[in-house]
Amino acid sequence: MLMLACQTGLRATELTQLTVGDAHLGAGAHVSCLGKGRKQRITPLTATTVTVLAAWLIEHGGRPADPLFPTRAGTPLSRDALERRVTKYTATAARSCPTLHEKKISPHTLRHSAAMRLLNAGVDVTVIALWLGHENVATTRVYIHADLALKERALARTAPQDAAPGRYQRCACRNSIRAGQAACSYSWRMPVPLQNSSYRA
């Protein structure tokens, strides 16, 4: 269920209301759901997601009209039940990824992750809007701003603009190749400060 949420970016309600018949695992594998405004949306599935869902259906079975992810009583999961499962498995994942302790992970976080993955893969924002079921592309642009914020934070971690000017110095071991000696794994050394140079910024 969580893999499907991460890959498709379905809303929590869309995910919990899926039926067995909504999962099409043959050629052109996809899930079909009713989004906001009772609009039907079809979302393609990756081979990995298909494999996991197929195993799930073999284990749990069910008729086409049955919930794809049922409770013990056979009814659809509630939003609260979904959130509890996300919280549970986030805690499990945090054992190997401690930074998760500092984050609030919710079903919407999985939807956000799906959108960001598509954006980072170069998918056009209009396609992402269709993928997520957004009626207005402006709603999807929040992910562009989020992506920009991530890049700005990465930029802030780079060397400050007021750092002392430097130059790259050829690694002496590059010349050792001609002598038949082994070279190190670095072709160039780190920048070294300029001394007694006529360089001006």
Image: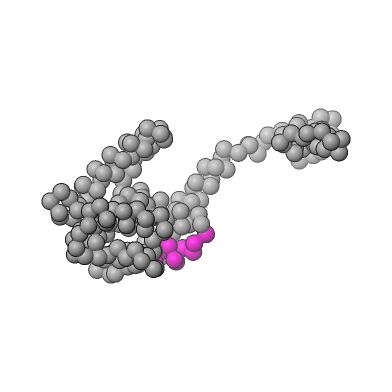
Determine the image quadrant of residue 161.
top right
Question: Residue at (32%, 36%) from the top-left corner?
Answer: 91
* Total count of labels: 0
In the depicted structure, whether residue 91 falls above or below residue 35:
above
Q: Residue at x 49, y 47 (%)?
A: 149
Place of residue 35 in the rendered image (x, y in percent of width and height, measured from the top left): 28, 64
Colouring of the image = one colour
Residue 47 in view = yes
Viewer-proximal residue among 148 and 31:
31
Rendering quarter of residue 168: top right
Q: Position of residue 114 (x, y in %)?
A: 40, 54
User: What's the residue at 44%, 66% (across, down)?
Assistant: 127
Residue 98 location (% of width, % of height): 40, 32
Most distant residue in the left direction: 73
Q: Is residue 194 left or right of residue 30?
A: right
Nearer-the-camera pick, 122 or 17? 17
Residue 12 showing in the rendered view:
no
Q: Is residue 164 one of those drawn in magenta?
A: no
**Magenta portion: prevailing SS class:** helix
User: Is residue 62 found left or right of 54 in the rendered image?
Assistant: left
Q: Is residue 77 above or below residue 128?
A: above
Residue segment shown in magenta: 122-131
Q: Is residue 175 left or right of residue 144?
A: right
Residue 103: x %, y % from top left: 37, 38
Which residue occupies the extreme right position in the image? Answer: 179
Quarter containing the C terminus: top right
Q: Residue at x 24, y 48 (%)?
A: 82
Q: Nearer the viewer, residue 60 or 169?
A: 60
